């Protein structure tokens, strides 16, 4: 009886290991019904707050470019304005971001924060703010862990998939892509 029970338990474990992995889906987001009116508008991605802000800002710019909904302000223009005006990304609130967006000729700005950037975990929060009204048009956040099988599936076929568990930049790239994809839901 004991052997039979052990066999059943082992069989169940093996069967569960063969079960397909559900795709990872970011659940912490909202999309305003006003977002569609911003298609073909100019959007500026401002420097992120938190650790690895340059990397996260660049990855977000790339991922938003892939979405293809907006004209993105050139990153160098954003960096030049921040240098000229001596802006500190860590001290930019929504009101200052709106002023900066207007200075860049953008109808909306993207603000982001990397709250965790480590070998096995990345946490990101990104939002799109209308520069005229200050209204949040889209916001998403999530924390992804490299050991999560569903997260590993997100990286399948990507150039950075082999680096996912050992390189925080690879995990940040997968995290930001997953977060940005919520714009289209």
Image (tube, grey):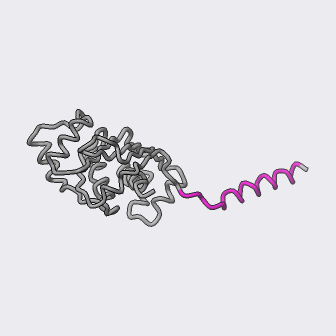
**Where residue 125 sits in the image (x, y, percent)?**
38, 43
Q: Position of residue 168 (x, y in %)?
A: 37, 48
Predominant SS along the magenta part? helix
Q: Per the image, is 10 magenta?
A: yes
The residue located at (55%, 54%) in the rendering is 149
Residue 34 drawn at (x, y percent): 36, 51
Residue 167 makes an appearance in the image: no
Closest to the observer, 111 or 34: 34
Residue located farthest toward the right when viewing the structure as drawn: 1
Quadrant of residue 127 in the image? Answer: top left
Most foreground residue, 112 or 165: 112
- Residue positioned most to the bottom: 157
> Is residue 174 one of those drawn in magenta?
no
Q: Is residue 36 visible?
A: yes
Please name the residue shown 15% across and 49% down the image. Answer: 104
Read off the magenta span: 2-23
Q: Is residue 89 left or right of residue 144?
A: left
- Tell me how many marks there are: 0
Q: Quadrant of residue 114?
A: top left
Q: Nearer the viewer, residue 37 or 72?
A: 37
Q: In the image, what residue occupies the spot 87% across and 48% down?
A: 2
At 28% from the left and 55% from the top, the residue drawn is 61
Asked if residue 123 is positioned above or below residue 163 in the image, the reply reads: above
């Amino acid at each position: 009886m004991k052997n039979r029970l052990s066999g059943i338990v082992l069989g169940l474990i093996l069967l569960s290991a063969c079960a397909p992995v559900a795709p990872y889906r970011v659940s912490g987001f909202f999309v305003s019904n006003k977002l569609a009116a911003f298609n073909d508008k100019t959007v500026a991605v401002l420097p992120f707050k938190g650790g690895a802000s340059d990397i996260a800002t660049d990855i977000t710019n790339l991922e938003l470019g892939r979405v293809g909904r907006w004209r993105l302000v050139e990153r160098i223009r954003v960096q030049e304005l921040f240098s000229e005006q001596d802006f500190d990304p860590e001290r930019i609130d929504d009101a200052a971001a709106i002023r900066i967006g207007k200075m860049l000729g953008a109808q909306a700005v993207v603000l982001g924060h990397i709250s965790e950037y480590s070998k096995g975990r990345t946490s990101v929060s990104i939002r799109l703010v209308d520069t005229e009204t200050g209204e949040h048009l889209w916001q998403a956040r999530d924390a992804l862990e490299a050991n999560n099988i569903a997260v590993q599936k997100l990286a399948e076929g990507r150039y950075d998939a082999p680096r996912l568990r050992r390189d925080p930049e690879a995990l940040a790239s997968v995290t930001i892509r997953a977060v940005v994809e919520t714009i289209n839901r």
